[in-house]
Image (tube, coloured by chain):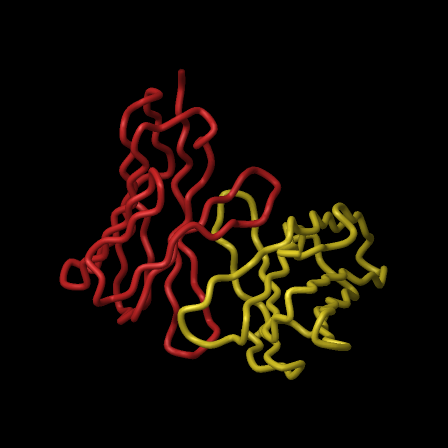
Chain colours: A red, B yellow
Amino acid sequence: SQKIEQNSEALNIQEGKTATLTCNYTNYSPAYLQWYRQDPGRGPVFLLLIRENEKEKRKERLKVTFDTTLKQSLFHITASQPADSATYLCALEGSTLGRLYFGRGTQLTVWP
Amino acid sequence: DTEVTQTPKHLVMGMTNKKSLKCEQHMGHRAMYWYKQKAKKPPELMFVYSYEKLSINESVPSRFSPECPNSSLLNLHLHALQPEDSALYLCASSQAGTLREKLFFGSGTQLSVL
């Protein structure tokens, strides 16, 4: 069966450090992968999209890598801040157009 | 305007009630989605409308009935729900429902079924 696994439910890091979140998948052959941020009681907010032929994508303090051989994406937040505290979700499209499937998410807490 | 607006924000209903959730976007998007999310779980796709036609129904029970009156509006009609249907219901939209599109989500309706 298809699975999207995000390495840990929770990650706690100190302000200024780099947070690294992992997304692993099985039985998918995604052409691209997306990352979203979700705050409590709110809908997810799109952050980055990376295509299968892109090894790395950056946006300000965010960096995403995509390794289709390992079936893994890494999401990095550099110089993390308490305002980065949220749940981060990775998402893949299924075999049918329009079906976007989400991982459970990693809850990141950045402490001062 | 890059917002997806959902109403109401909170809803409490009994198992015999009929209620509706509403969603609106004015970004000119032609695909709209309903997702259901339980606490500490990922959002789960329920329905997709593409160009105002239902294109995906993820085997959702008939007590949930979607409706897309026009390209800006999406409703979810609820009837005879069960307590296990209590969840955050999220509406989303995207440009055309094709590959590689990001979704814009609303803030959701927190539904409690008593």
Q: Is residue A48 left or right of residue B25?
A: left
Q: Position of residue A86 (x, y in %)?
A: 47, 36
Image vertical order of residue B55 relative to residue B33, above or below: below
Q: Choose between A84 and A8: the one closer to the eye.
A: A84
Residue ID at (70%, 51%):
B109
Please provide percent x and percent y for residue A42: 60, 44
- Report which quarter residue A96 is drawn in: bottom left
Q: Where, by quadrant of the figure, is residue B92 drawn?
A: bottom right
Residue B114 in sight: no
Q: Residue at x 72, y 70 (%)?
A: B72
* Residue lying furthest top: A112
Tag count in the figure? 0
* Quarter occupied by the N terminus of chain B: bottom right
Q: Tell me if residue A38 comes above or below residue B1 in the rendering.
A: above
Horizontal side of residue A50 vs B61, given as left or right: left
- B88 and A19: which one is in front? A19
Would residue B26 be visible to someone looking at this image? yes
Residue A95 in percent (x, y) is at: 37, 77
Q: Is residue B104 above or below residue A59?
A: below
Expressed as whole percent of the image width and height from the top left, the position of residue B82 reads 71, 58
